[in-house]
Amino acid sequence: MRALLAQEGWSVNRKQVQRFRRSSGLKVRPKPKRIPRQGESTGLPNRATHRNHVWTWDFIFDRTDGGCTLKMLTMLDEYTRQCMAIRVERYIRSDRL
């Protein structure tokens, strides 16, 4: 409904359309309910007790002045909090990781 109104030149957002439909007595689809995860976790968190015991990795995204995206993969040692490796590229594909 919002897309049709936008095509006709109306400036409305999703919540305005929902409010109107509710006040008119029309059915509005509720948000899907979140289903909690079933069973036990397979990856229990480990607390690092010595060097090189637990490593963590993370992706960091940034933009250059020209607007290009930079992707960084960082690997840290949890115990020393030292950066073990960092890989910076515009495109990091799974086969190159």
Image (cartoon, grey):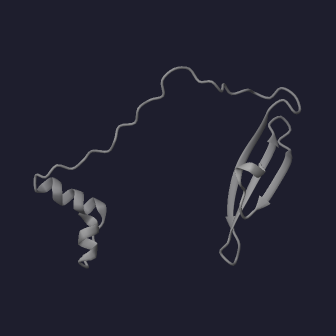
> Which residue is rendered at x = 13% and y = 52% of the image?
26
Please give left or right for residue 25 compared with residue 57 in the image. Answer: left
Please give left or right for residue 10 compared with residue 56 in the image. Answer: left
* Residue 64 seen by the camera: yes
> Which residue is rendered at x = 83% and y = 34% of the image?
79
Q: Residue furthest right?
A: 51
* Residue 11 seen by the camera: no
Residue 42: x, y in percent?
63, 24
> Which residue is rendered at x = 89% and y = 32% of the image?
51
Q: Residue furthest front?
A: 95
> Which residue is rendered at x = 85% and y = 49% of the image?
85
In this rendering, the count of numbered labels is 0
Vertical position of residue 12 compared to residue 32: above or below: below
Residue 45: x, y in percent?
68, 27
Residue 4: quadrant of the picture: bottom left
Residue 20: quadrant of the picture: bottom left
Residue 97: x, y in percent?
77, 48
Vertical position of residue 70 compared to residue 31: above or below: below
Residue 14: quadrant of the picture: bottom left
Residue 6: x, y in percent?
28, 73
Vertical position of residue 71 compared to residue 67: above or below: above
Please give left or right for residue 3 compared with residue 43 in the image. Answer: left
Q: Residue furthest top?
A: 40
Q: Which quarter shows the N terminus? A: bottom left
Closer to the camera, 51 or 29? 29
Vertical position of residue 61 compared to residue 81: above or below: below
